Image (tube, helix red, strand yellow):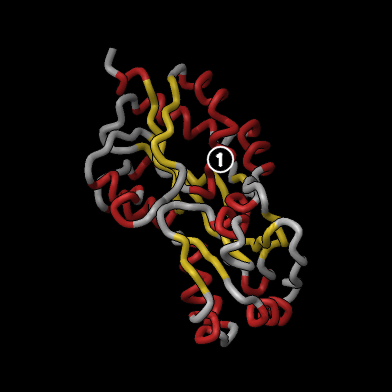
Amino acid sequence: MNTRTRDIIVMTSGAFTAPYLALIPRLELVTKKKIVTAATSIGTGANSIPSRLQRGEPVDVVIVADAVLVELIRDGMVLAKSRTAVARSAIGMAVRAGAPMPDISSVEALKRTLLQAKSIAYSASVSGQYISTELFQRLGIADQMARKSRRIEGGERVGAVIARGEAEIGFQQISELLPVPGVEYVGPLPPEVQRVSVFSAGVAVGAGDSDAAHALINFLTSPEAARAITKSGLEPIPK
């Protein structure tokens, strides 16, 4: 049997990985297909989801930041009409388990924490881009941060770097920090400097079973899926 008609292949960014993995048993019932996970991070460079799609790797459903999905639609890799917002995601901070909990309850407290930190890690995806190219500049501390900040490449979770003690504090989408063992979630960025991102799903051009792929995406906007999405630290976006 052709696996492209038997399975549904999914590539998802890290922010949506936790609820997606939790929902796989229900997704398989809804679609009557086996769900095959080809990616659980947007990645970087040649291993990024866009690069893999450009190489023609098989995929049926793509779940990424909405701005990335729009680019994939523009490049002819995802069907425009299938674009569906599924969750909103905020950025949070974590420290190694057992470490003192920094104060980030206000913009000034966040700034003090950043200046006092010996090392900082941030992701290579949308949250890290905001942290490194906008937040530090808004706080007026870009030069100080450049000397002690590290961008985490290759799809590795920032939390894993924090848990190993390779950075004192780390920033990533909250849903990517919460599942990581060995870290303590400190909290979200203050509202005045928070950046909420929308994550969307789409059906890939050339999907093996576009009807099943559409059914999978529709389920992600259902009340049942909303419970798993909320539990992961994301905000569901119902249809």
Seen at 44% across and 26% down, the residue is: 35
The spot of residue 98 in percent (x, y) is 76, 58
Q: Is residue 210 left or right of residue 33?
A: left
For residue 56, which quarter of the picture?
top left
Q: Quadrant of residue 92?
A: bottom right
Which quadrant holds residue 5? top left
Judged left or right of residue 188, residue 3 is: left
Left or right, 237 with respect to 35, comes to: right
Relative to 140, does residue 53 appear above or below in the rendering?
Answer: above
In the picture, the quarter occupied by the C terminus is top right
Residue at 61%, 50% (x, y): give it: 175
Q: Report which residue position mark 1 lands on.
A: 239
The residue lying toward the viewer, choosing from 167 and 144, is 167
How many numbered markers are drawn?
Answer: 1
In the displayed structure, 221 sits above or below 70; it is above
Q: Can you name the residue that lies furthest to the front here?
A: 165
- Residue at the image position 38 percent from the left and 31 percent from the top: 9
Give me the residue at 53% from left, 77% from top. 148
Check the image and report above or below for 145 versus 130.
below
| CA neighbours of label 1 inside 10 A, class few (<14), some (14 to 19), many (20+) | few
Q: Position of residue 77 (x, y in %)?
A: 27, 44
Element class at badge 1: loop
Q: Is residue 235 visible?
A: no
Along the line of sight, which residue is nearer the eye, 104 or 167?
Answer: 167
